[in-house]
Amino acid sequence: AEEALAQAKARVIRIIAPHDGVVRRIYVTVGTPVEAYQAIVDLVDDSVIHVTAHVDELDALRLTSGTRVSVTIDALLGHQFTGQIVDVSNTPVGNESTVSYEVTVAIGDALKANAMNGDMLRIMEGLSSTVDIVTVESKGVLRIPIHTVTGSVSLPTVTLYDDESEITDHPITLGNHGNYWVEVTKGLSEGDQIVGLNLQSTSDSSADNLIDVTSTEDN
């Protein structure tokens, strides 16, 4: 009877973790009375690393759970980790002039990151990181630097260089764009040359500031 009672008591005080992980914090000590639903330990799932980032309101509208991202942790320079967005907050963060939204990213290869971290054993909370989010992706398309586009938003143009002469206000149709490149869907062909600022040239001559129209498959 005493053995059965001891086993019954052991079953009552046994705490089963809901998942594998690392105990980050213990809130009680031996002999401390506890109540129902009281937090005993803080258990962290270290198989996944979560990163939070603030995204501009215009970009936030284009983000959904599952969007692919790459993350560079400042303390692990040279190593880039892949992940995906798991949550986009509906609550704005910011001040009177800017509005942004908090985005939560899960790094799937967290164990690989921990192994690279050597003596630190695991990625520590609070580390700074840079998050690159792929909001749109185009493959096999023509692209030119954004700064070479002139005209207006509704009627974009470029200065085409053909047969050693400049053709100004040459109309084009634009597609997706990033911070530097913009997709050209109509008006140019691969191998065409346009006049723009060539950062490798110190000359003001148009012939020395030509940019080739290339495809994304070439880069």
Image (tube, helix red, strand yellow):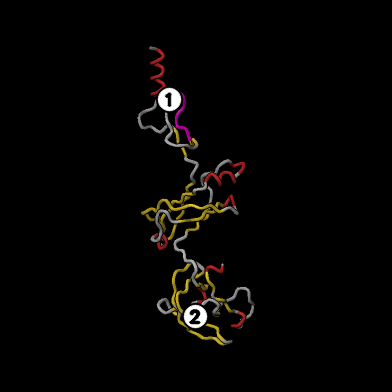
Q: Amino acid at mark 1?
A: Thr
Q: Amino acid at mark 2?
A: Val
Report the residue marked by disc 2: 158
Q: Name which residue lies at 42% across and 79% down.
A: 155
Image spot of residue 46 (x, y percent): 50, 41
Report the residue marked by disc 1: 32
Residue farthest toward the top in the current orientation of the protein: 1
Q: Is residue 108 above or below residue 43?
A: below
Q: Main secondary structure of the magenta part?
A: loop
Q: Name which residue lies at 41% across and 21% down.
A: 10
Q: Name which residue lies at 47% across and 66% down.
A: 138
Image spot of residue 6 (x, y percent): 41, 17
Image spot of residue 207 (x, y percent): 61, 82
Query: Residue 7 versus residue 60: which sits nearer the camera?
Result: 7
Query: Residue 58 versus residue 96: which sits nearer the camera?
Result: 58
Bounds of the magenta segment: 25-31
Q: Quadrant of the C terminus?
A: bottom right
Q: Mark 1, residues whose alpha carbon is within 10 Å: few (<14), some, or many (≥20)? A: few
Query: Residue 14 versus residue 34: which sits nearer the camera?
Result: 14
Q: Name which residue lies at 38% across and 16% down.
A: 5
